[in-house]
Amino acid sequence: MNLSSNNVTKTFMDCLFKNDEDKTNHVKVEGIVSIFGFYPERLQSHYEDIKSMLSELPIDFRTTHGGGMSFLEACNDCNGIQWTGEHQVMEQLFVMAIGLDLAKYCSPKETWQVFPGGVPYIAIQEAAVAEASTTDATYIPYALYSSTTRSNRRSARTICHKNISS
């Protein structure tokens, strides 16, 4: 599943409880602004979709490459193209990932105020997205990347990761 605001929100909404469902067994995740309770089986059924979307985020979010990155950087994909302008959508992606143990906060909530914007650094578990990425993926240094045109970057979306929707 490709990383997009629509895909994240649609997946997120499906993982929430419906009105008539028993909420005693739930996956509770504390987000940046809210606390969420997910229906465990539906959250698990979207494991591959969420992993796929995470693999399109900048490589510095991964535990073995950058060790984590500011939540504020999650609005861009690995090619530097903005995929969402909504912090709420970014939070939706990360709380689902945390609920599946695909990501984690790099520090306790009490320390977030020292970070830019008062938001956390988040790390994506490398093993969680490794299968979704190509083994010969190339990381583009920012200096080289910033000199390319936006249209060239868009057409080179697979430079960081394979097209996992095919």
Image (cartoon, grey):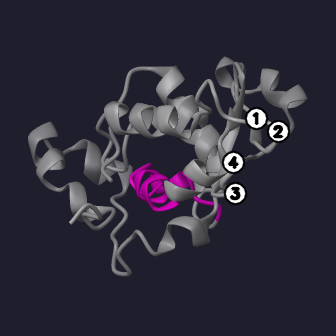
Residue 101, numbered label: 3
Q: Amino acid at mark 4?
A: Gly
Residue 22 vertical position relative to residue 19 in the rendered view, above or below: below
Residue 73 vertical position relative to residue 53 in the rendered view, above or below: above
Residue 23, numbered label: 1
Tell me what residue is drawn at x 33 percent, y 32 percent.
6
Q: Nearer the viewer, residue 15 or 66?
A: 15
Of all residues, the one furthest to the front in this rendering is: 20
Q: Nearer the viewer, residue 118 or 140?
A: 118
- Kindly state the secondary structure of the residue where label 3 is placed: loop
Q: Nearer the viewer, mark 3 or mark 2?
A: 2
Q: Quote the CA–CA distance across marks 1 and 3.
A: 20 Å
Tell me which secondary structure the magenta stretch mostly adopts. Answer: helix
**Span shown in magenta:** 47-63
Q: Do the residues bearing badges 4 and 3 touch, measured as CB atoms within 8 Å?
A: yes
Quick one: label 2, few (<14), some, or many (20+) residues within 10 Å? few
User: Mark 1 or 4 closer to N-term?
Assistant: 1
Locate residue 166 relative to residue 14 in the image: left or right: left
- What residue is shown with label 4? 99
Task: Indicate whether residue 53 is drawn in magenta.
Answer: yes
The image shows residue 5 at horizontal and vertical percentages of 36, 31
Quick one: label 3, few (<14), some, or many (20+) residues within 10 Å? few
Q: Do the residues bearing badges 1 and 2 touch, measured as CB atoms within 8 Å?
A: yes
Q: Do the residues bearing badges 1 and 3 touch, measured as CB atoms within 8 Å?
A: no
Q: Nearer the viewer, mark 2 or mark 4?
A: 2
- Kindly state the secondary structure of the residue where label 4 is placed: helix
Tell me what residue is drawn at x 48 percent, y 27 percent.
89
Locate residue 9 relative to residue 38 in the image: left or right: left
- What residue is shown with label 2? 24
Q: Quote the CA–CA distance across marks 4 and 3.
A: 6 Å
Q: Quote the CA–CA distance across marks 1 and 4.
A: 16 Å
Residue 74 vertical position relative to residue 138 in the rendered view, above or below: above
